[in-house]
């Protein structure tokens, strides 16, 4: 996925939850955490494990996922091509109604909202690790300048005898 689209209704609901009691604030943080993990690219697909999914998933709409946020709230995501849409956040009953009303949904009309580009995670290269090792190896000769060959033989012979 390359983009995440967050519906204006979802953003409004997040703000309303933040203004509620402690439970609402916790729910808003969970939603933000799910969105953040999608944006940071820690989940390369919207169904990767980044949150608690509902027990039976969602089969009414292709490439749809429901997240169980707790306290009777759900977050719905849809993947279309390289974009993950977050069209709805609400109570369990409101999500059921939204899914029933959109069960034949093939294309998603975005409407108002914002699109965020997903950060691509670059795998760590072996070259950088080799370079780090080379730097460490270059520092080692400085450490041994103060030791004589006699000292080194005594240390290493003691090490080999200790392993027998």
Image (spheres, grey):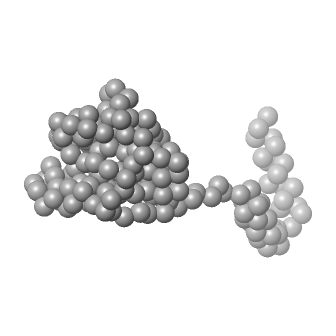
Q: Quadrant of the C terminus?
A: top right
In percent of the image, x 37 and y 45: which residue is there? 77
* Relative to 113, 22 lies left or right: left
Q: Where does the image place residue 136, in percent across and percent down from the top left?
A: 74, 66
Q: Position of residue 43 (x, y in %)?
A: 49, 48
Would you say residue 68 is visible in this rendering?
no
Residue 48 sits above or below residue 121 on the image: above
Q: Is residue 71 left or right of residue 124?
A: left
Q: Is residue 41 left or right of residue 65?
A: right
The residue lying at 26 percent from left, 34 percent from top is 100
Identify the residue at horizontal 47%, vertical 41% (top origin). Answer: 48
**Which residue corresponds to the image point at 53% horizontal and 51% vertical from the top-left?**
82
Q: Position of residue 88 (x, y in %)?
A: 28, 48
Residue 90 visible, this angle: yes
Pick the front one: 18 or 16: 16
Q: How many marks?
A: 0
Q: Nearer the viewer, residue 138 or 155?
A: 138
Residue 96 appears left or right of 150: left
Q: Residue furthest top?
A: 56
Q: Position of residue 60 (x, y in %)?
A: 35, 31
Farthest residue to the left: give it: 21
Closest to the observer, 113 or 56: 113
Image position of 112 with respect to 43: above or below? below
Q: Which picture quadrant has residue 7?
A: bottom left
């Amino acid at each position: 996925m390359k983009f995440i689209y967050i519906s204006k209704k979802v953003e409004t609901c997040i703000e309303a939850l933040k203004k509620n009691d402690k439970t609402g604030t916790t729910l808003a943080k969970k939603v933000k955490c799910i969105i953040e993990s999608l944006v940071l690219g820690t989940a390369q697909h919207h169904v990767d494990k980044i949150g608690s999914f509902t027990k039976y998933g969602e089969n009414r709409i292709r490439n749809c996922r429901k997240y169980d946020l707790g306290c009777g709230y759900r977050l719905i995501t849809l993947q279309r091509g390289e974009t993950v849409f977050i069209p709805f956040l609400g109570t369990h009953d409101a999500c059921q109604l939204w899914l029933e009303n959109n069960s034949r949904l093939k294309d998603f009309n975005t409407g108002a909202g914002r699109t965020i580009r997903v950060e691509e995670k670059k795998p760590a290269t072996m070259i950088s690790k080799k370079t780090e090792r080379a730097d460490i190896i270059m520092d080692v000769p400085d450490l041994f300048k103060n030791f004589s060959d006699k000292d080194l033989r005594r240390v290493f012979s003691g090490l080999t005898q200790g392993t027998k």
